[in-house]
Image: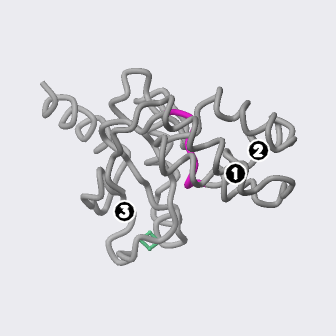
Amino acid sequence: MEAKSICRCDLNAELEKVIAQHEGKKDDLIEVLYWVQENYGYVPKDVQQIIADKMNVPLSTIYGVITFYHLFSLKPKGKYGISLCKGTACYVRGAPQVLERFEKELGIKPHDSTDDNMFSLEVVRCLGACGLAPVMTINKEPRVRMKPDLVPGIINECRNADK
Ligand code: FES
């Protein structure tokens, strides 16, 4: 999706309209959250509170939905979006160890971004290149036959490209 250059107050006004369209329909929570993710780029805390108040849904329920579905994020996406496949082929060929190394090196878990907004980490299902497992992408560029020892080099590559 193309980034929108609408000011935050306009977005909040739009959000009120979207919520009004779903008034009294708690089952529409995911649709509202999807709209927020698409338009804000993530689901900010204050927006969660607005949704909770207006849709009369507990904040804990909203948080639960956001953290359950991979398409939602709690922070803005980092400049480098890392998506690691944990489909069956990747899983059995070492994806969990690669993920663990990313978590250690970046200090974040999946669904999160680094504080400097450089990296986001996501876990995805089959990327369609199982023969080259484990597979990951950085900003949609594939990296194949991943190994934990390759992780620091990839992170440095991104950091150096940004200098
Ligand atoms: S399981 Fe990872 S690419 Fe298919």
Q: Position of residue 96 (x, y in %)?
A: 52, 52
The answer to whether 34 appears left or right of 26 in the picture is left
Callout 2–callout 1 Cβ contact below 8 Å: yes
Quadrant of picture, ligand 1: bottom left
Residue type marked 3: Val
Q: Which sits earlier in the primary sequence, circle 2 or circle 3? A: 2
Q: Position of residue 34 (x, y in %)?
A: 59, 54
Instruction: Please tell me in which quadrant of the rendered image residue 148 appears.
Output: top left
Q: Is mark 3 within 8 Å of ligand 1?
A: yes
Region in magenta: 70-75
- Per the image, label 3 sits on a secondary structure element best described as loop
Circle nearer the viewer, 2 or 3: 2
Q: Which sits earlier in the primary sequence, circle 1 or circle 3? A: 1
The answer to whether 60 appears left or right of 13 in the picture is right
Residue at which label 1 appears = 68
**Which one is nearer the viewer's eye here, 105 or 92?**
105
Residue at 48%, 72% in the rendered image: 89
Label 1 Cα crowd, 10 Å radius (few <14 / some 14-19 / many 20+)? few
Q: Is mark 1 within 8 Å of ligand 1?
A: no
Residue at 30%, 37% in the rendered image: 79
Q: Position of residue 48 (x, y in %)?
A: 69, 35
Residue at which label 3 appears = 135
Label 3 Cα crowd, 10 Å radius (few <14 / some 14-19 / many 20+)? many
Image mark for residue 64: 2
